[in-house]
């Protein structure tokens, strides 16, 4: 049986989820892609931490050791921040590896350039996990809405924010306590600033803008507020519900985007989307308004998006080899 050699960049909440799914669902993966998937290396930062990986897996903090492995087929990237990640992926594409990423900051900033480079090097990039984790928004837009023109987009794109707003309102709990729970559940980033200041949702709506309109608005024109700007009292006592909503629309030649907490009433499509769920409402020219909803953060939902990308990429390669 052929072997697909994989490396994981990052072995935190997301990377560990990917590793576990590959191990636990090896037989199904074999059937789906026609090859055995072997994780041969992981890149981490702290070499002193204990890692739950097989003994023959190379664990290193040096990307060059990974890119020196012969015949590496794919990299699953789930590290944090735009750099050095972008540089690592740029090199990995030159090496000839497919890339599957969950890193929205990196992808909002460098996704276009990496996609171009991937095309030149005949490899693919899967980025489903960069937006709404387990909810297949990217592939729905890429594959199921090709003839439709997408007008306005309204979305809940940060699982942590929706979880915090929901828990605070339902249980009248303080912000700091619920944020801790969101961190312990693997929803919030280790540094939760981007979650609660709206920056994480901003990166995600920029990725959607690039995908839908082929460009992003000037970043400094986007109104950006996070849930940290809302008082506890308002969250507990407002009529309606606070939701952290990202909106996107092309008006004439101009793309307009906002990312902010607003109060919605029960008529609003995002009113009933609660907890860690994300949802994206797409106004489409033929199908009408479509809403897609599901878990927007966490280890398994994110690993799900990355492994589904993996299957698409390697089923394509299998078809190419057979034809
Ligand atoms: N958590 C979630 O629900 C989701 C997260 N994401 C994105 O996925 C990525 C990972 O998130 P998550 O798993 O939660 O984060 P964690 O903080 O849990 O894990 C990050 C991992 O990356 C490693 N790492 C960080 N920086 C570097 C670096 N410069 N070089 C090598 N390794 C590095 C860390 O190493 P070490 O173990 O040594 O500290 C750790 O293993 C982020 O970009 C995040 O935005 C996307 C969707 C959902
Ligand atoms: N911290 C993020 C994780 C997924 O992207 C969130 O809460 O949405």
Image (cartoon, rainbow, N blue to C red):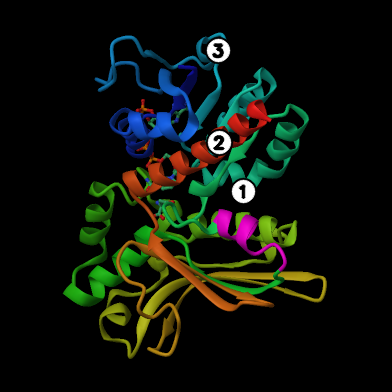
Location of residue 230 (image quadrant)? bottom left
Residue 149 placed where, x, y %?
72, 71
Whichever of callouts 3 and 2 sits on the residue coming sooner in the sequence is: 3
In percent of the image, x 60 and y 44: which residue is there?
Answer: 107
Label 3 or label 2, whichever lies nearer to me, is: 2
Residue 75 placed where, x, y %?
52, 27
Say above or below: 147 vs 60.
below
The quarter of the picture where the C terminus appears is top right
Tag 2's secondary structure? helix
Mark 1 Cα-neighbour bin, 10 Å: few <14, some 14–19, many ≥20? many
Badge 3 vs badge 2, beta-carbon distance below 8 Å: no
Q: Residue furthest front?
A: 323
In the rendering, which numbered label is found on residue 64? 3
The quarter of the picture where the N terminus appears is top left
| Residue marked by disc 2 | 315
In percent of the image, x 75 and y 38: which residue is there?
Answer: 116
Mark 3 Cα-neighbour bin, 10 Å: few <14, some 14–19, many ≥20? few
Tell whether 143 sits left or right of 53. Answer: right
Whichever of callouts 1 and 3 sits on the residue coming sooner in the sequence is: 3
Q: What span is in magenta? A: 138-147
Say above or below: 311 vs 167.
above
Location of residue 71 (image quadrant)? top right
Tag 1's secondary structure? helix
Q: Main secondary structure of the magenta part?
A: helix
- Residue 83 visible in the snapshot: no
| Residue marked by disc 1 | 108
């Amino acid at each position: 049986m052929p072997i697909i050699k994989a490396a994981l960049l990052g072995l935190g909440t997301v990377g560990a989820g990917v590793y576990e799914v590959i191990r636990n669902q090896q037989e199904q993966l074999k059937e789906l892609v026609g090859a055995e998937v072997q994780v041969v290396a992981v890149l981490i930062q702290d070499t002193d931490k204990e890692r739950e990986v097989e003994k023959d897996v190379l664990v290193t903090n040096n990307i060059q050791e990974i890119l020196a492995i012969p015949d590496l087929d794919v990299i699953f990237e789930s590290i944090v921040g735009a750099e050095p990640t972008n540089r690592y992926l740029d090199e990995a594409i030159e090496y000839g590896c497919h890339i599957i990423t969950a890193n929205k900051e990196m992808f909002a900033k460098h996704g276009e350039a990496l996609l171009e480079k991937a095309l030149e090097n005949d490899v693919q990039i899967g980025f489903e996990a960069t937006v709404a984790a387990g909810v297949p928004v990217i592939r729905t837009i890429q594959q199921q809405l090709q003839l439709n023109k997408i007008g306005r987009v309204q979305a809940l794109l940060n699982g942590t924010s929706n979880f915090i707003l929901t828990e605070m309102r339902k249980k009248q709990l303080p912000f700091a306590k619920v944020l801790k729970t969101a961190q312990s559940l693997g929803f919030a980033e280790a540094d939760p600033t981007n979650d609660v200041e709206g920056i994480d949702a901003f990166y995600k709506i920029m990725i959607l803008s690039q995908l839908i309109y082929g460009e992003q608005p000037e970043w400094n024109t986007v109104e950006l507020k996070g849930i940290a700007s809302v008082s506890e009292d308002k969250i507990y006592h407002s009529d309606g519900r606070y939701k952290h909503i990202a909106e996107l629309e092309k008006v004439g030649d101009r793309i307009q985007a906002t990312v902010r907490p607003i109060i919605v009433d029960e008529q609003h499509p995002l009113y009933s989307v609660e907890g860690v769920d994300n949802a994206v409402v797409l106004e489409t020219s033929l199908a009408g308004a479509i809403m897609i909803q599901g878990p927007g953060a966490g280890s398994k939902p994110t690993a799900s998006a990355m492994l589904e990308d993996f299957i698409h990429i390697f089923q394509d390669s299998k078809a190419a080899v057979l034809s």
